[in-house]
Image (spheres, grey):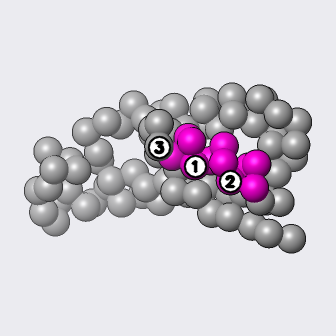
Amino acid sequence: MSTALILFSAGQDSATCLAWALDTYDRVETIGFAYGQRHAVEMSQRPILRSAIAAQNTSWAARLGGDVVVDLSGYGALAESALTA
């Protein structure tokens, strides 16, 4: 059984990667990182977009596994960067 882990932000690039992986691998799981990013709306759209992508194809729905969001919200307290400011 082939598996893949996709870094999924719900942006255009990661959504394309997720669709490709679902077409390529037997099982695909997703991970995201919440670090206080400027475009936090993408994080709120992750579960909605995952469901919409799975609904496009019954085999994709069967292959889509779990999702984890890692909370790195303290990142912004360590250093200011283009990711958070």
Residue at point 74%, 49% (across, down): 22
Residue kind at label 3, given as amino acid type? Asp
Residue kind at label 1, given as amino acid type? Cys
Q: CA distance from mark 1 to mark 3?
A: 6 Å
Mark carried by residue 9:
none
Mark carried by residue 21:
2
Q: Is residue 34 magenta?
A: no
Closer to us: 25 or 29: 25
Mark carried by residue 17:
1
Vertical side of 69 occupied by 85: above or below: above
**N-terminal label among 2 and 3:** 3
Q: CA distance from mark 2 to mark 1?
A: 6 Å
Neighbour tally class for label 3: few under 14, some 14-19, many 20 plus, Cα within 10 Å: few
Under circle 3, the secondary element is: helix
Q: Magenta residues: mostly which secondary structure?
A: helix
Quickly name the residue at label 3: 13
Which quadrant would residue 68 be assigned to in this image? bottom right
The answer to whether residue 67 is seen in the rendering is no
Which quadrant would residue 57 be assigned to in this image? top right
The answer to whether residue 75 is seen in the rendering is yes
Q: Are marks 1 and 3 in contact (CB under 8 Å)?
A: yes
Neighbour tally class for label 2: few under 14, some 14-19, many 20 plus, Cα within 10 Å: many
Horizontal and vertical percent position of residue 5: 63, 63
